[in-house]
Image (cartoon, rainbow, N blue to C red):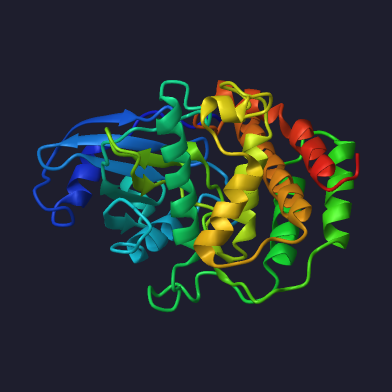
Amino acid sequence: MSQDVTTLDTVSVAKWLRGRVPGVREIKSATKFPGGQSNPTFRLDTDGPQLVLRRKPPGKLLKSAHAVDREFRVQKALAGSDVPVSRMYALCEDPGVIGSDFYVMDYVAGRNFNLPTLPEQSKGERWAIINEMGRVLAAIHDVDIDAVGLSDYGPEGNYYRRQIDRWTKQYRNSQTDDIAEMEALITWLDANIPPEDGQRGLVHGDFRIDNMLFHSAEPRCLAVLDWELSTIGHPYADLAAVLMQWSMPAGTEGRGLAGIDRADHGLPTDAQFVEDYCARRGISGIDNLGFYVAFTFFRMAGILQGVKKRALDGNASNPERALRVGRYVPRYATGGLNAAGQL
């Protein structure tokens, strides 16, 4: 049965917020953001501060998915760090309030760029924005997880081993078709995991330009969004995810940079972005980059397969878009094989 994810019981939420968010007694309106395929997100106009509520979707969910409690914890831990995040107010784990877990944070007014081509910005502004994106990425990976209380935020052991196992399982649980390219990619990744190199830190898990909010007039990030896939792991997965996204077609569907003359547009090459990242983190270079990019293609294919399955089950936040992006699963699998040098 289809579940309504477009509305919110504002009376119940307002009652719960009293005493937890200073100055709030009633919610005047709740407006669902059009994005957020995984966890429905609402802007709350109150008699106090403007807020954002992010909730688990209703209905049957895959185990460990839609972890709003983890999103809340990591952003709360990063308050005051070099990683910009919204102010966290409260987490609700009582399903009696609206039917699923949710958390409430400050609304951050800023610019959100959906496309890495940054078509409405000048050439110089594009370079500055992408440079800030690289700075924030390095800042995430340089977080002292012991100092901020996140050392237990992810298990010990090989990050890629557990991620490949996890997303293979998630993919199997939401699989709707037999995709030969996905099977080949899973087999290759399973056999080519690099040895551990001692790097263990915070990873965002879905680091993209559209998961960032920027100052209205400056190339300065005000908040990194969508921490659902964050964990303690290996930093190159986040870096590779940026390169993966950029390899996709330009435009509103692929949201990549394929075919774009980057120098003419004021955008860095992959090599320049990686070089700047390494300089910020004080490392000499990255070996076996193809594996990390192939891995991120695989993980994104698994994510999109889950989005497609939720649409078919009637639990998607935006069913039409969910089915549309679900058609990209074979393409991401093929991209992974290309990155791995298998095509």
Residue depicted at x 36% and y 30%: 32
The reply to whether residue 158 is in sight is yes
Locate residue 64: give its quadrant.
bottom right
Q: Tell me: 154 left or right of 188.
A: left
Position of residue 124 measured from the top left corner of the image (x, y, whole percent): 42, 31
Q: Tell me: 108 left or right of 72.
A: left
Residue depicted at x 62% and y 36%: 307
Name the foreground residue: 208 vs 182.
208
Q: Identify whether 156 is placed above or below 305.
A: below
Please tell me how many numbered marks the rendered image carries: 0
Residue depicted at x 72% and y 49%: 293
Residue depicted at x 44% and y 60%: 139
Position of residue 236 measured from the top left corner of the image (x, y, whole percent): 63, 58
Position of residue 104 measured from the top left corner of the image (x, y, whole percent): 29, 49
Task: Pick the quarter of the image with the C terminus.
Answer: top right
Name the foreground residue: 11 vs 290.
290
Q: Tell me: 224 left or right of 190.
A: left
Q: Tell me: 321 left or right of 122.
A: right
The reply to whether residue 303 is in sight is no
